[in-house]
Image (cartoon, rainbow, N blue to C red):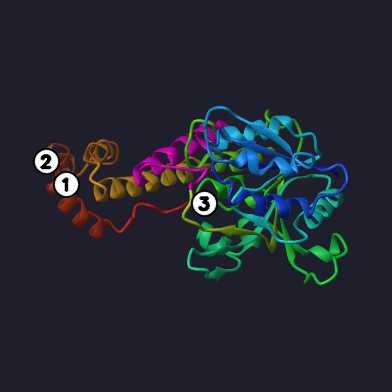
Amino acid sequence: MNISIIIPTYNRARLIQRAITSALNQMRKGDELIVVDDGSTDNTKKSLKPLQDKIKYIYYQKNAGAGVARNIGIKKAKGDLIAFLDSDDEWIDGKLDLQRALFKNCPELFYAFSNFSITRKNGGIVKSYLKQWHQDKRGWDEILGKGEYYSSINPLPEKTDDFKVYFGNLYYNLAKAPYICTDTLVVRNRGAGKDWFFDEDLSIYEDWGCYGRIAGVGQGAYMDIDLSWQHDHKGNRMTSCTSTPEKYKARMKVLDRVWGQNQQFLEKHKTYYSNIIKLVQIKSLIESIKEGEIKEARNLIRVLYHKRNLMLKLLIYMPSFIVRIVHSVHLKIIKFREIVFEN
């Protein structure tokens, strides 16, 4: 099974060599590596010239974000499978072989992802970071589905300890938490660009929308093994966002596009979806007040408390410092009691 590897980049000439090397070391005959340069103004293009016979380099004139860059790669991809790697990260040896074999032996599988490790700016290392990423205390047999050892599916490579693979439908749970790290994601290339894509108008959570779409297309698998390194650093990010409230606005757009427009889903899980929306709105309200974005806070107060609580409704018309004080007291009282997820 051939794999198309997509690496989006922007002004990371000093970092991208590490990512490319980790990918090239795992490629097999027939694989391809597509580097999509999202309008870099540093010497990225020059630094990649020695590798021009090993990669497909695409320069996109306008810096448009990670969503656009990855979608360009998807449209150019010719492989049976599509894998993603950010230009400041790297894969752990053996990643592609493990995932390639999994797809070969599981013809109904549409996408697969795994755990990952991170390195801090201070050099600290955290392994198996995914649980801190999604913050769900449940096990994967409950989040996704029944697990089975990889060795029962495919022979293990030498020096690789056995691990479990969990199969199932992640669409329902993805509405409330991001369970997938893009560096670990591999997707079967069935009609790529039609059934799934990254949001191009969002500067953050463009990948979360993609996760939801692929989860709605077919079966997924979580591989309980670290297969990539995510490196923290002081440089630029492909994903950028001006404020925390802006992040919640993007989150609301993703929820509406992927789950809010799915009438079949809403017929079964309307309360669950409504509670997620309310939780996001409350968190956004908290952050808006913290960051002094009082206009946005007042808009959220109108939405959240338009039918009750006279004091909170009056906050709309009060000076900003009073908004901060009163809402802070109110939060200590409610303790999010109204946010109860549907079982």
At label 3, the amino acid type is Ala
Per the image, the residue denoted by label 1 is: 323
Q: At which x and y percent is residue 150?
A: 80, 63
At label 2, the amino acid type is Met
Element at badge 1? helix
> Marks 3 and 1: CB-CB under 8 Å?
no
Task: In the rendered structure, find residue 318 and report the number of the disc placed on it.
Answer: 2
Query: Gap between marks 3 and 2, in whole Å?
Result: 35 Å
Q: Residue at x 22, y 38 (%)?
A: 298
Per the image, the residue denoted by label 3 is: 177
Q: At which x and y percent is residue 206?
A: 53, 39
Q: Is residue 151 above or below residue 324?
A: below
Q: Is residue 279 within the magenta segment?
A: no
Q: At which x and y percent is residue 78?
A: 79, 34
Q: Is residue 289 left or right of residue 127?
A: left
Q: Main secondary structure of the magenta part?
A: helix
Q: Residue at x 26, y 51 (%)?
A: 290
Q: Earlier in the sequence, mark 3 or mark 1?
A: 3
Q: Residue at x 62, y 37 (%)?
A: 213
